[in-house]
Image: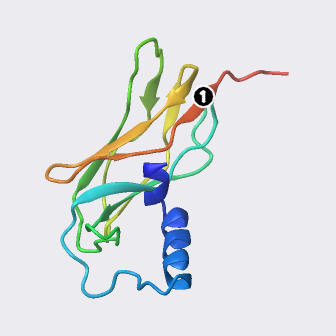
């Protein structure tokens, strides 16, 4: 749920709820980047097939707002747990533009029901995607 709360959709719902309750959404200048967050992460994938959705990560301030001045390198990796036999393929390091990093050619090799991507960059707290499954490809 925590990574979902950081997703754009989750944040929009949260802000709408605050406004409905009479609370104000964060205002004022955007602060310095403090962490990375997934705005678009993978859903269930087929093993060895490029993700259908581009994976997107953004640099956010402490209030969860995108820091458009961040243009550093962002790396994604697969969080490996005991018993996992999966690997991440594709371009795993890209340079963010205006606070956003997009990974367009990622794929998972192997089958697992608990894949999680970790986004990292020096000096910022890492971000975690929601868990997703990778399934074998069944040819007809």
Seen in the picture, residue 30 relative to 56 is either above or below; the reply is below
User: Residue at 31% of width from left, 61% of height from top?
Assistant: 96
User: Residue at 23% of width from left, 67% of height from top?
Assistant: 70
Label 1 neighbour load within 10 Å: few <14, some 14-19, many 20+: many
Seen in the picture, residue 6 relative to 134 is either above or below; the reply is below
Judge left or right: residue 18 versus residue 97: right
Check the image and name the residue furthest to the right.
140
User: Residue at 22% of width from left, 49% of height from top?
Assistant: 121
Judge left or right: residue 95 versus residue 123: right
Rendered image coloring scheme? rainbow
Check the image and name the residue furthest to the left.
123
Q: Quadrant of the C terminus?
A: top right
Seen in the picture, residue 106 relative to 102 is either above or below; the reply is above
Residue in front for this viewpoint, 74 or 61? 61
Seen in the picture, residue 103 relative to 50 is either above or below; the reply is below
User: Is residue 92 among the parts visible in the rendering?
Assistant: no
Residue 125 at x, y percent in the picture: 23, 50
Query: SS at mark 1?
Result: strand
Question: Looking at the image, how many numbered discs can be counted on the residues?
Answer: 1
Check the image and name the residue furthest to the top.
83
Residue in front for this viewpoint, 35 or 104? 35
Residue in front for this viewpoint, 17 or 116? 17
Residue 80 at x, y percent in the picture: 39, 23
- Residue hosting label 1: 134
Residue in front for this viewpoint, 121 or 104? 121
User: Residue at 23% of width from left, 74% of height from top?
Assistant: 69
Quarter of the rendering containing residue 16:
bottom right
User: Is residue 107 among the parts visible in the rendering?
Assistant: yes
């Amino acid at each position: 749920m925590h990574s979902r709360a950081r997703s754009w959709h989750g944040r929009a719902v949260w802000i709408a709820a605050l406004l409905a309750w009479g609370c104000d959404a964060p205002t004022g200048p955007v602060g310095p980047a403090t962490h990375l967050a997934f705005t678009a992460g993978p859903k269930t994938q087929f093993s060895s097939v490029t993700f259908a959705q581009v994976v997107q990560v953004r640099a956010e301030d402490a209030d969860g707002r995108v820091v458009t001045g961040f243009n550093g390198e962002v790396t994604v990796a697969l969080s490996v747990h005991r018993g996992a036999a999966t690997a991440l393929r594709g371009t795993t390091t890209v340079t963010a533009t205006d606070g956003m990093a997009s990974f367009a050619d990622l794929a998972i090799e192997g089958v697992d029901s608990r894949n999680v991507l970790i986004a990292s960059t020096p000096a910022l707290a890492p971000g975690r995607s929601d868990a997703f499954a990778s399934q074998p490809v069944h040819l007809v």
